[in-house]
Structures are given as C-alpha cells and as structure tokens.
Image (tube, grey):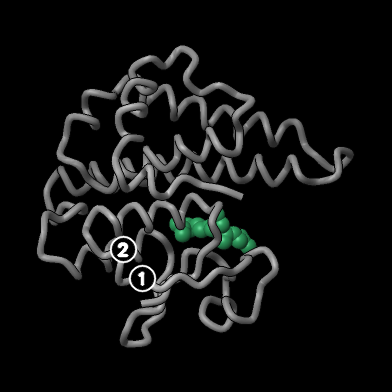
Amino acid sequence: MKLYYSSTSPFVRKVNVFAAEVGLDTQIEWVKTNPWQAEDILTAENPLSKIPTLKTDDGMILYDSSVICEYLDSLHEGKKLIPADGDARWQALSLQALADGILESGIARFLERKRDVALQSKDWDALQKKSIERSLDYLENSISEWSEKEFNIGVLCVGCTLGWLDFRIPDENWREQRPALTDWFEQFSTRPSMVNTRPKE
Ligand SMILES: N[C@@H](CCC(=O)N[C@@H](CS)C(=O)NCC(=O)O)C(=O)O
C-alpha cells in the first residue's frame, strides 16, 4: 500500500506509529507530497489535498488518519489497538478525538503565525490556545484513567500530539504545571515506534 505523506505532519506520524505498533510499517510505500500546494499527485486521490492519504493494494483510497488506522487494525491478527466494543472502544475513540482536536487547534495557530503580522488575529490565537490548555489540563488530571489502560489508539494519539507541540510550539512549555503528563510522555517517547518517527523538517 502507498501512503502519501510529509515528514512533519502529526497525523501522518499517528498512522506511522500505528503501523509500526501493529507490525505493518514494512508494507507501506511512502510517497512524499506537499498538501499545501495541492499537487496533482495528491489531489488525484484525495480532493481535500490532505495527508495522510492511503492507497490500498486493491486501489482503494482512504483518508483521514482515523480511517486509515482503523483499516490497518483490520489487517493484522495481533492485539487490536482500536477496541471492538464497550466502554473501552468509546473511551479510546474519544481520547483520539481529544488528542486530534489539540492538533487541529495547534495547527490553526501555527498557520496563523505564518500569516502577515497585520492579518493575524490575537483573539483567534487566544481562543485556540485556551482550547489546547484546557485539554492538556484534562489529560494531566485524568492521567490514571487513560494511561493505565491497555495501549490503544487514543493513548498513541496523545503521544503524537505532545511530540508535535514540542516540534512546532516549543516556546510554550506544555510541561509546566503538568508533571504527570511530562513523566508519562518521557516514558512513552522511548517506544521504538516513537523514536523512529520523530518529526524533522
Ligand atoms: N483530520 C485529518 C487531518 C489531516 C490534516 O489536516 N493534514 C494536514 C497536514 S498535518 C494537511 O494535509 N493539510 C493540508 C490542508 O489542509 O490543505 C486527519 O486526521 O488525517
């Protein structure tokens, strides 16, 4: 299968970490693209021009990262990272939504900062920043509820999100006042799937 990617995308990293954790990373052929330039190579497969986009061996096109992870989970016989049913499923999916939501707010801020200073909105930035801070506080305060569960997609997404904050918004120290999340991430970052997928320009 082919994965359209860029090396800095946290959503691509999520798929990459997921694939490594379920032993499918070696089956992926990587196709580098720049989604911001709406390259034909990508828009021909995904009209949104977003990555990650996956082309399966049967020629099926899948997006977004959550759908791709669900597909990958269906391909292996090992322990599933997306629980099939019950509370475990809904909690893992909600944790994924929270972590992905932090990324969406973070990316909105990152892009806003790239605009001409005169066009940047302080209110918009403050709104997104608050959303990120509330979510990180929630993760800190509920750490035993989610981090002690079996490894799942939600936990994986939290790791990728914190890694992206370090990469793209390093001037705001998310670790401050969040000792439990800090310790958790330090440990989580040693997983080979995380070590081998560190973002780089
Ligand atoms: N919800 C999507 C988000 C994907 C996404 O926003 N990817 C960014 C790169 S990190 C992208 O391709 N942006 C290009 C654009 O929005 O035009 C997912 O989970 O895959």
Q: Residue reaching furthest right?
A: 118
Q: Residue reaching furthest bottom?
A: 58
| Circle on res. 28 | 1
Q: Residue 183 appears at what percent x and percent y?
A: 34, 20
**Image vertical order of residue 62 relative to residue 158, above or below:** below
Residue 15 visible in the picture: yes
**Image vertical order of residue 174 relative to residue 40, above or below:** above
What whole-number distance in Å separates the C-alpha atoms at marks 2 and 1?
A: 6 Å
Q: Amino acid at mark 1?
A: Ile
Q: Amino acid at mark 2?
A: Asp
Residue 94 visible in the picture: no
The residue lying toward the viewer, choosing from 24 and 36, is: 24
Q: Residue 188 appears at what percent x and percent y?
A: 31, 33
The residue lying toward the viewer, choosing from 129 and 193, is: 193
Residue drawn at 29 percent across, 56 percent down: 20
Q: Residue 182 appears at what percent x and percent y?
A: 39, 21
| Circle on res. 25 | 2
Q: Are marks 2 and 1 in contact (CB under 8 Å)?
A: yes
